[in-house]
Image (tube, rainbow, N blue to C red):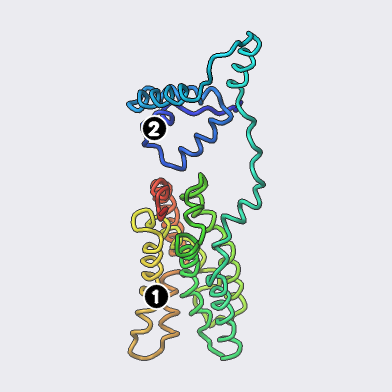
Amino acid sequence: MTAWHAPEALIARYADGSLPDADAWSLEKHLESCASCAGRVSGAVRATAAGAVLADVRDAVLAAATPAPAEATPQDLRDAVLAAATPAPAEAPPPRTPRLLWAAAPAVRGAWLPAVLLVALGAVLLAHVAGFSGARTLLLAVAPVVPVAGVALSYGRHADPLHELAASTPSAGLRLVLTRTAVVLAVSLPLLTFAGLVLPSPGGPGAAAWLLPGLTLTLAALALGGWLGLRTATAVTGGGWLCAVLAPALATPDGEVARHLSDQLSAYVGGAATQGGWAAAAALCAVLLAARRTAYDRLERF
């Protein structure tokens, strides 16, 4: 027996077919070890329009499968009733570590991880080999879209050959997306920040100034994904940032792209007030994502 029991609202939604697939599968798994909830769910289903049909099917199956009556002792009947009423022992869940590795694997394989290393190493080589003084500024301009791109490349049919299988499990939906997003952030945030620390600074924002904007853009892409789909949302979010930061600097008539880019970044990520605005925007995006969490139950499932 288990200490948790399914609430009536959940059972009613299961019976009328309005419960999302992931929640329905989780409830069915719970019923394997909870006779009380199994009886309540059975009664709720029998009370629906499908109950009469299911009863007819059950009677027909039993009539076809029941052998000719035989002499049975009271002890045989008691044993049969006990065997039918005793739930099968629940299987032990698989180890947690392999499950996490399986869920997170698409976030660190393929072309994304080499791309992150290339961005970090390219900025270091530009600064220390080519003598480019604006390497940190360029890195700070590109860094916020790196985790956004990582999220886009870690979830969906285009990124995961086992996507259909993963999307049909109870752990799918927003939980799976957040697991892979956490892996993307765990790799990109320290790596790109360290690269920024070893680059010479000609002034402008610090090496860690991009962290809050990068986190906010990632959360914004996830929140928009509930409406637009994950790939479209990441393209809109990342593309909007690059256009806002790079386009004004590249369009300057005097050709001093590095200086204008540094000024743009200072306006977008420099100062306590600006960083506070990014923090507030991140909190708002997190609230929107929580409000739209059920949209991920069917996002890119098939």
Q: Is residue 21 visible?
A: yes
Q: Is residue 13 above or below residue 224?
A: above
Q: Which of 113 and 26 is in front in this view?
A: 26
Task: Say what secondary structure mark 2 lies in.
Answer: helix
- The CA span between labels 1 and 2 is 48 Å
Residue 170, position in %: x, y?
51, 44
Number of numbered discs on residues: 2
Q: Nearer the viewer, residue 152 or 261?
A: 152
Q: Please name the residue shown 58% across and 62% down the image.
A: 186
Residue 113, position in %: x, y?
56, 70
Q: Please name the residue shown 41% across and 57% down the image.
A: 281
Q: Can residue 272 be seen in this view?
A: no
Q: Is residue 126 above or below residue 48?
A: below
Q: In this view, does 114 lie to the left or right of 142?
A: right
Q: Please name the residue shown 38% across and 71% down the image.
A: 239
Amino acid on which disc 1 is placed: Val
Q: Nearer the viewer, residue 7 or 86?
A: 86
Name the disc covering residue 227, or none: none
Disc 2: CA contacts within 10 A as few (<14), some (14-19) or many (>=20): some
Residue 122, position in %: x, y?
56, 82
Name the disc covering residue 13, or none: 2
Q: Is residue 82 left or right of residue 156?
A: right
Task: Give the mark toward the camera: 1 or 2.
Answer: 2
Name the disc covering residue 245, or none: 1
Residue 40, position in %: x, y?
47, 23
Q: Please name the residue shown 41% across and 68% down the image.
A: 238
Q: In which quarter of the image is the C terminus?
A: bottom left
Which residue is outermost to the top? 74
